[in-house]
Image (cartoon, grey):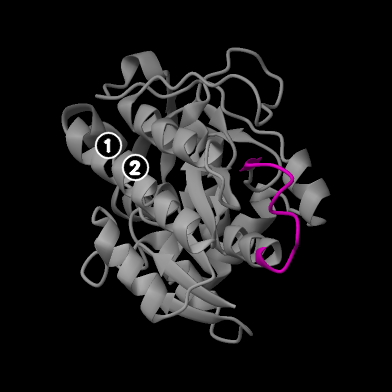
Amino acid sequence: MRILVTGSNGQLGKEFKNNTSNSDHEFYFTDKKELDITKKKEILDSVTIYKIELIINCAAYTNVNDAETNKRQAIKINLDAVRNLVEVCEEKKIKMIHFSTDYVYNSDNLNPISECSNINPINYYGISKREGEKIIEKSSSDSIIIRTSWLYSMYGNNFVKTIIRKGQNAKKIYVINDQFGCPTYSKDLVDCTLNIIVSNAFNNYKVFNFSNEGYTNWYDFAKKIFELKKINCKILAVNSEKYKSIANRPKYAVTDKSRIKDIFNITIRKWDKALEEFIINYK
């Protein structure tokens, strides 16, 4: 299969690059310099020239705080570009896998959130991602959405790398303890996506949750990182109401992964086990 990957210089795109070298599929990796997905003609030209059968869209505007003041750019990437991709998929009859976020949810109970409930984004990043989702949900193409959360990898900026850096350069740090969610090792997300590609189950559902199993809060996540990395830095818990942030974050975004496990017959490891592997390999 010929597969086009957008946003290949982001942390998820780079993870695909790093884990597909031995794949039987033929991958074409592009970033905004090679392919501007806000321009439909460029997408159409690329899929035609390379005879693309599937698009994996890793491109996104992901700066949660900046999205509050740069709404037009967030919409341009998270909605307008997605519309272009969907229209090309429909015209060329090709498939797409698109990544979204747990920030479309905002639950106030402690039950794991399924794909069909609690859609109520409370920041503009979540709103812009939800608008892009709607385009895909209405599409006649064989396209699916994978909502992921608390993503980290060897590449780019993410919570795990930031906490390690801070812990190595400070005697104490403050971390929020009242926001709960599911960490996701990007390598596991890539492995899951590759399993989906070889399946014939694209038509069953449009939306799937994926993260590592289990859940935690940012404070306990940081504690586990320090424990595994053997960092001697004191962590102090702080309530999110006392932590100044431009964008609101959901207090509880723990997702149910039953659908993706059942449909694609995959096993998902616990978040702390995935983190162990990451820490071993992280330099």
Q: Quadrant of residue 132?
A: top left
> Would you say 67 lies left or right of 236 here?
left
Task: Identify residue for label 1.
Answer: 75
Mark 2 burial class by Cα count in 10 Å: few <14, some 14-19, many 20+: many
Q: Which of 141 and 171 lies nearest the eye of the viewer?
A: 141
Figure quadrant of the C terminus: bottom left
Task: Identify residue for label 2.
Answer: 78
Q: In which quarter of the image is residue 12?
A: bottom left
Q: Residue 21 at x, y = what percent?
A: 54, 85
| Residue at the far front in the pictured view | 91
SS at mark 2 in the image: helix
SS at mark 1 in the image: helix
Q: Is residue 267 above or below residue 4?
A: above
Figure quadrant of the N terminus: bottom right
Q: How many marks?
A: 2
State how far apart marks 2 and 1 are (Cα): 5 Å
Q: What stretch is highlighted in magenta?
A: 197-208
What mark, if any, has residue 164 been given in the picture?
A: none
Q: Say if the magenta span includes residue 203.
A: yes
Q: Residue at x 48, y 73 (%)?
A: 52
Q: Quadrant of residue 97?
A: bottom right
Q: Which residue is drawn at 62% across and 30% down?
A: 254
Q: Which residue is drawn at 31% across and 35% down?
A: 64
Q: Residue 282 at x, y = what percent?
A: 47, 69
Would residue 27 be visible to someone looking at this image? yes
Q: In this view, does 129 lie above or below 119?
A: below
> Would you say 21 lies left or right of 115 here?
left
Q: Which of 230 and 180 lies nearest the eye of the viewer?
A: 180
Q: Are marks 2 and 1 in contact (CB under 8 Å)?
A: yes
Would residue 150 be visible to someone looking at this image? no
User: Please, what is the three-letter code of the amino acid marked with disc 1?
Assistant: Ile
Q: Which of 168 and 190 lies nearest the eye of the viewer?
A: 190
